[in-house]
Structures are given as structure tokens and as C-alpha cells.
Amino acid sequence: MSMNCFSLSNKLALVTGGSYGIGFAIATALAEAGAKIVFCDLNDELIEKGLIAYHKLNIAATGYVCDVTNELAVQEMVKKIETDLGVIDILVNNAGIIKRIPMLEMSSTDFRQVIDVDLTAPFIVAKAVLSSMIKQRRGKIINICSMMSELGRETVSAYAAAKGGLKMLTKNIASEYGEYNIQCNGLGPGYIATPQTEPLRTNGHPFNNFIIAKTPAARWGTPEDLAGPAVFLASTASDFVNGHILYVDGGILAYIGKQP
Ligand code: NAP
Ligand code: GCO
């Protein structure tokens, strides 16, 4: 296999929640490997923010306002993308939320909202793109899982349940559609410095040093740490990798943690 197996030339990638953070970093990496980028986010302001950021990097991205929990809106967005730009070759289910609330204090409404965005939405968006991937006998779906696909901790019951479910949804899509040359894998970031984890890293929060002590790399990850693994899972280099969760965590899942 030649090394251009990492090339994404002539591929169209949809990244959900791609205006900033991990989604933006992954989309940038896919673009640098040759992919055309489409992204969606919740409102015009986020789309504008993303477009400015992509254009600063000379990436001609296209943005759509779409709440990925809204099945009709997702179906309409995918149909518009396919009309305007072509079939989606690569889907990155990145959009996600977290609510850090002790379980006994968490309402079922809050629980359901996290499940809706972090688990049901990846199902909805994957379903919307799979038909065309089946027709073209190829496709790549990358679900952004989490260390919480494997571990729990206080206050993140809904998030861990969603990300654990997303791990199994990933394996099931791989199982059900692998025969159509569709690969569905997960990317499991460790603790990454983004707006989502800012409350844990700032104002002297004890979690900051805790994570550094628990991570062999002795640092928080950056969104850019996910770039290479994402290109690998989006490219023909991973055509025989299916149903796998690739953890990009600095080794944290392998390590008991430094003695205090
Ligand atoms: P982030 O900074 O909160 O960005 C998430 C993006 O998704 C935001 O643009 C957000 O828009 C968007 N989004 C949220 N709900 C949406 C919806 N219903 N429809 C469309 N877009 C929606 O998060 P991040 O840290 O970059 O994380 C991205 C993904 O990686 C998430 O799935 C997260 O669970 C996962 N992850 C993060 C870490 C980490 O340490 N940061 C580690 C492992 C996994 P708004 O700005 O309006 O919320
Ligand atoms: C938390 C963090 C984590 C990260 C990530 C770890 O509160 O524990 O937000 O959940 O977001 O998912 O992989």
C-alpha cells in the first residue's frame, strides 16, 4: 500500500459541531489531507465563527445551521449537501455536550438532553448518510467517543452512558454495514483542552493537576493531537479497521496514576 493511502483528495467530509474545538481541529486535518469540508453547528453565529476560522487557514469550508438532534433537519441538510456538493464520503459525529451534575441531583430532562445530543444524534446523522455510502460501496464514519466510553467518574453519569452507548453504536454500524465497504470507528480523546473542559482546567481547579498526574504524557491533550488519528480513520489506510475505538489519550487509560 503506497503512502498516499492517507490522501483524502476528492473526498467530502461532514463534521458536526465543527465551528471550533475538536471538530474544527479534525476538519482542518482532513482538509490538509485533501478533503472538502462541510460542517454544521447550532446557529448562524457559530457558522460565521467557523467560516472565519477556516478561511483564515485557506480552507474553503461550507457551513450549515443544523441541530443534529432534529432528524428532519439532518435529513434536509444531508439532502442539500448531496445536491450542492456531492455524496458525503466521511462523517465525523463530533457534536456533543456534557452536564456535570451529581446523579441524584440530575433531572431526567438533563439526562435525556445529553443522551439526545451525544448518542441519538450520531445515530440520526449516521442513518442520514449511510444510504448513499451503501450505494457507492464505500464510506467512513468516525464517532467521537471518550475515555468515558470506558470509565465513569462523579457527576458525568449521562455523558458516560451516552459515550458508552456511542462505543457500542460504533461497533454495531461496523457490524451491520461492513459488507458495503463502510468502516465505522470511534476516536476516543483523553482530556483535551477545549471550551468543554475549560471549567476543569482553570481557577485552580484540582482536576487540572489530577489529570496531569493520571496521564503518562503529563499534559492535557490539544485538539491537534487528534489530527493524525482522524486522517488515518478517514482514509483508505484504515479500510480493514472496523468497529475499533482508537483512544488518543496520552496513555491515561493504561496508567494507574502517579503516586501522590
Ligand atoms: P465543545 O467545545 O463543547 O464543542 C462542541 C461543538 O458541538 C460546539 O460547536 C457545540 O455548539 C456543538 N453542538 C452541541 N450541541 C449541538 C447540536 N445539538 N447540534 C449541532 N452542534 C452541536 O466540545 P469539544 O471539547 O470540542 O468536544 C467535541 C466532541 O469531543 C464532543 O463529542 C465531546 O464529547 C468529545 N470529547 C471531548 C473531550 C475533551 O476533553 N474536550 C474528550 C473526549 C471527547 P455550542 O457551542 O453551541 O455548544
Ligand atoms: C469530564 C470531562 C471528560 C472529557 C472527555 C474525557 O468532565 O470528565 O469533560 O468527560 O470531556 O470526555 O475523555
Image: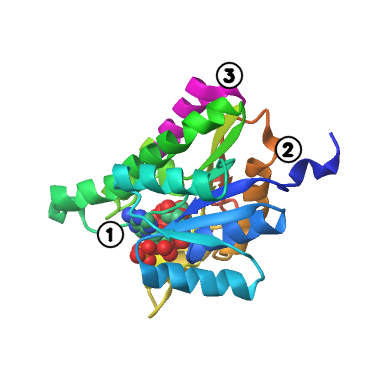
Residue with the mark numbered 1: 100
Inter-mark Cα distance, 3 to 1: 39 Å
Locate residue 43: give its quadrant.
bottom left
Foreground residue among 29 and 154: 29
Residue with the mark numbered 3: 179
Q: Is mark 3 within 8 Å of ligand 1?
A: no
Locate residue 233: give its quadrant.
top right
**Mark nearer the viewer, 3 or 2:** 3
Q: Which mark is residue 23?
A: none
Query: Which of the two discs, 3 and 2, labels the residue nearer the N terminus?
Result: 3
**Mark nearer the viewer, 1 or 2:** 2
Query: Which of the two discs, 3 and 1, labels the residue nearer the N terminus?
Result: 1
* Apparent side of residue 82 relative to residue 44 in the rendered image (left or right): right
The N terminus sits in image quarter: top right
At horizontal 38% and vertical 37% (from top left) the residue drawn is 123
Considering the whole magenta stretch, tell me its main secondary structure. helix
Label 3: how many residues lie within 10 Å, few (<14), some (14-19) or many (20+)?
few
Query: Which of the two discs, 1 and 2, labels the residue nearer the N terminus?
Result: 1
Q: Position of residue 121 (x, y in %)?
A: 35, 44
Q: Secondary structure at mark 3?
A: helix
Label 1: how many residues lie within 10 Å, few (<14), some (14-19) or many (20+)?
few
Q: What's the amino acid at mark 2?
A: Ala
Instruction: Confirm whether the magenta stretch covers residue 168.
Output: yes
Q: Which residues are magenta?
A: 166-181
Q: Is mark 1 within 8 Å of ligand 2?
A: yes
